[in-house]
Amino acid sequence: MTVQEIKNAVCVSIDKNRDKIIAVGESIFRDPELGYKEFKTAEKVKNVFEELGLEYKDKIARTGIVASMKGREHKLTVSVMGELDAVVAPQHPFADKITGAAHSCGHFAQIAAMLGVAYGLKESGVMEHLSGDISFMAVPAEEGVELEWRNEMMQKGEISYLGGKQEFVKLGIFDDIDVLLMQHTATDDKMTTAGPNAMGFVAKIIQYIGKESHAASPHKGINALDAARIGLTACDALRTTFKDEDGIRFHPIITKGGNLVNVVPAFVQLETYVRGRSNEAIKEASSKIDRALKAGADALGAECKIYNIPGYMTPFESDLLKEIAEENMVSLVGKDGVEKSMYQCTTDANDISNLIPTLHASIGGATGTAHSKEYEITNPELAYINAAKMLAMTVVDLLADGAGKGIEVKNSFNAPHTKKSYLEYLESLKNQ
Ligand SMILES: [Zn+2]
Ligand SMILES: [Zn+2]
């Protein structure tokens, strides 16, 4: 079979399974779960892998699942990935009544498209023409949220990192993966290979510990809120020292600010990200901010505890992989349907892009602002079906003809990090 014939066969199979692909996506949409707790979502993914007779491992990083599909020979392994988790948007019509979780980031459509690739490659029987294996991954916890709960889980040793993909790296799940393909649903009607903009971050939980006393006798206490205020003012004084090109953003919130107005607050908690355009700049700004935050505690004689939680890295792209995917986009929706622009967010897929060639495409089909109560899929053909076809066609390009193109993508990629240096970088952020 020619490459085009293989692609056609896969797309016919995806079309045949159209209703099933959309149904599993809609079912996940209506039953959202937050990161590292996607137990029901994981069951839905496993049901499809079982229907297709794929071998899989589950409970990876709590809820993750990896299924494999073998080619006729093993020259490469390509991972096709989807994310299991929702975000919090309690006003969303399908928000979980208890947790407030809602699928207003489109991960349900992304998981469905990943499963669509599995339907297409399996049922068309084309794997016997491909010179590599596929690893289908459903990964927990892309959204870097619930910092307090995840920090507790980290302190207990249940997880090590904020993001599920970071956890997968640590667990060795990417050790034998050569190329990663994924896409994220967008709120427009275009396809693009341009992923998230070049912002990474470190997350912080900051605790000021003072001493309670009657507010009428403040000299007997240590005011943790005053310590926090001075710490934040010191951080503001740092803002002029950040270089424009580093794009440092520091945006704290106070999650605990005292209990009763007639008690000197003894415990105040803040959360923040420190964002930036390079990993070095993030690290430098993060350590300056820690210094300034601690100064507030010193001023009042309070204690300041900072938990630094490594966030996500800045992306590193494979131009060749993007070119291959973009040709497939044009063949599906025409040149006018393909855009070059990037969008404003960050993801733990950036971390993987520092290790192996990674496609993090963006495919429209949703409306409503991301992370808001209005978010829904209004163009299922684009968000589910064309997304699956684009990924499946790119798999075929990489693994057909003796996997020549896939090997070229792999060999032309100069990874900024090895697994070892990457994990060391994350640890260095934790231990500042
Ligand atoms: Zn999101
Ligand atoms: Zn997302």
Image: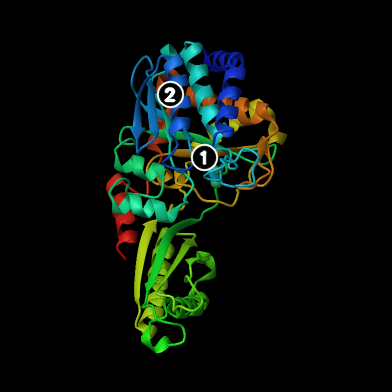
Front-most of 404 and 330?
330
Q: Is residue 410 above or below residue 90?
A: above
Q: Quadrant of residue 134?
A: top left
The residue beneath circle 1 is 360
Front-most of residues 290 and 4? 290
Query: Residue 57 or 127: which is nearer the viewer?
Result: 57
Relative image position of residue 386 (x, y in whole percent): 62, 27
10 Å crowding of disc 2: few (<14), some (14-19), many (20+)? many
Q: Which residue is mark 2?
A: 46
Ligand 2, seen in the image, is in the quarter at top right
Q: Answer above or below: position of 66 versus 124.
A: below
Q: Position of residue 47 (x, y in %)?
A: 45, 20
Label 2 to label 1: alpha-carbon separation:
24 Å
- Residue 100 position within the rendered picture, expressed as x and y whole percent measured from the top left: 56, 46
Query: Mark 1: which amino acid?
Result: His
Amino acid on which the number 2 mark rests in the picture: Lys
Under circle 1, the secondary element is: strand
Q: Which circle's residue, 2 or 1, is located before the other in the chain?
A: 2
Q: Secondary structure at mark 2?
A: helix
Q: Nearer the viewer, mark 2 or mark 1?
A: 2
Considering depth in this image, is 416 or 56 the residue closer to the camera? 56
